[in-house]
Every structure is written in C-alpha cells, then in structure tokens.
Amino acid sequence: MRQRSQSEGAGFPLILAGIVAAFLFLATSAGAGENVQDRQALREVLREILKEEPSLVLDVLRANSEFVLDVAQQGSDLRRQRILLSQWEQDRKHPKSVRLENRPTLGSAGAPVTITAFTDFTCVYCREGEQTIKRLLLLYDGKIRVVYKNMPMKTHPGAVEAAEFMLAAQLQDIDKSWELFDTFFANRTKILSGEGQAFMRSAAENSGLNLKRLLADAKSAKVQKILAEDEEDARKLQFEGTPSFLVNNLVIRGALQENLFRQAVDMALDDASGK
C-alpha cells in the first residue's frame, strides 16, 4: 500500500475539504441556474483528483457519513414518493369495495375519507401505523374515519385470539373495547409470549368486560364471519402483510411516513370534493 509522506498528510485535510465542498456545490446547485461551464470545470477537477487518489472517495464518505446518509435517505424518500404518487393516480381510477359493517370504527361516520386499516396486534409495524393514524384523526378532525379490519398472522401466538377478543369486546361495550385495543397494542410482546392467553384474559377483565361472555362471543359465528370476510378482502386486495391500508381507493402497503400518508388523505379529499 502506498504511504503518504508527511507533506502529503499535511495537505490531505485541505484536499478532503475541497472535495467535500465541491460535492456540496454540485449537490445543491443542480437546477439553480449556476454557470454550466463552471460546473463542467469543477467536474473535470474532481475527475483528475479522484484519478490520482481514488481512495479519497471512501475518505470523503467516511468523513461525511451523516451527510451521505441524509442524502441517501432523502433520495429513497423521494423515490418512494414518486412511486406512490404514480400508483395512487392509477388507484383513484379504480373503486375498491371492502366490507366495513360491524368493524371497530373511529372518527366521524359522515367523513368524506375512510381509512381502512388491516392490522395485527402482534405486528410491531402495526403499532407504528396506529400512532400515525391517531395523529391523522386529530389533524383531519371530522374529515376522516378509520375502520379496522383484522389480518392476524396465524403463525404468531395469540394473534388470532387477540383479534377475536377485540371483536367480541365491541359486541359487549364499545368504550371498554377501545381500552382493550390500546392495551393489546401496548403489550404485543406479552401476547406473543407463552403467557399470552392469560394476559389477554386479565386485560379484558381489567377493562371491565364480562370475561365469560367475551370468551363465548370470541368464538361466535358472528365474529368468525367477520374474520373470514376480512381475510377474503385482504386477499382480494393482494395484501400480504400488515399494516395495509385503503384511503378511500388509494392503496398503502406497510407503515408509511406521516407526510406521505397525509398526501394520500389529501388526494382522497380532493377526489371526494370533485377536484
């Protein structure tokens, strides 16, 4: 390996700083009207420097790792945004129908936008999605309602039973069922543990629900029909994991950053108002 001399070492930080400044200039000047000849000349200088010192690229990346990661994340976010917007333009042309009767629902019944959430109490990403949904309900007060459909991972211990408990709780007491809903999402690891059954029963009783009735309703034909319909609707929409959402007719697969989720809601509001 070629070793830098002491004089080279002394000048290296200046070279590195110059390269960083050049990269920053090129990254921030695109489309801003800067002189094209200046940009081309700067590229030629960079090309010559990197030809003599190719290892400087890695040095620059290491020295500016946070900046590089930020740029990469921004690029990834913009790419996903473009893909989603393109997909949603197609989605809005094709109405989608899912069964929403007797499902847990939050928000205004007459809201122009319905967010249908396919969820699983044992899914960590569903918990993240639920936090986003709660913020959206506050932000779009009166403009959206959220309807929950169950898509429990059958290989996860307690997932199906948690979904059954929530639907059964809704049949018994709406307010107490939402307390159970929050408890389940806040304690997914307990549901997944070997003590999951005992935890869910205890949580139901602590919410003030009648456990005997809850256990009977959980296995009732009504609850099992809802679960079967939710599974069928998820399959029809080609949802393979949770969380998944419909925002009126716009499809979201996976947890989504709030700013992108808001774009879907805004697009759905525009469609609902005929814009």
Image: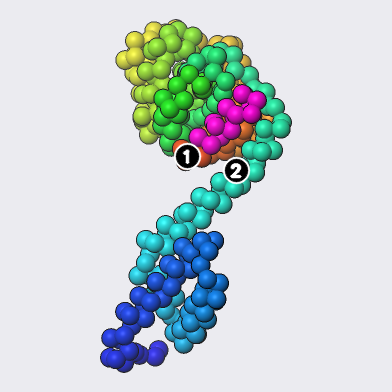
Residue at the spot 37% in from the left edge and 67% down from the top edge: 64
Task: Based on the picture, tell me whether residue 232 belongs to the magenta stretch.
Answer: no
Q: Is residue 119 above or below residue 9?
A: above
In percent of width and height, residue 119 lies at: 51, 29
Residue 92: image location, x then y, percent: 67, 32
Is 36 located above or below residue 76 in the figure?
A: below
Q: Which residue is mark 1?
A: 259
Q: Secondary structure at mark 2?
A: helix
Q: Could you tell whether 100 is left or right of 124 in the image?
A: right
The quarter of the displayed image where residue 209 is located: top left
- Is the residue marked by circle 2 packed among few (<14), some (14-19), or many (20+) residues within 10 Å? some
Residue 268 to residue 65: above or below: above
Give, as a three-letter code, the residue at label 2: Leu
Q: Which mark is residue 84?
A: 2
The quadrant of the picture occupied by the C terminus is top right
Q: Give me the C-alpha separation between circle 2 and circle 1.
A: 12 Å
Q: Position of residue 202 (x, y in %)?
A: 34, 18
Mark 1, secondary structure of its residue:
helix
9 left or right of 260? left
Identity, as a three-letter code, of the amino acid under mark 1: Asn
- Residues drawn in magenta: 262-275
Q: Position of residue 27 (x, y in %)?
A: 48, 65
Residue drawn 43% across the image and 36% down it: 128
Q: Assess whether residue 266 is covered by the magenta stretch.
A: yes
Quick check: 14 left or right of 102?
left
User: Viewer-proximal residue, 140 or 222?
Assistant: 140
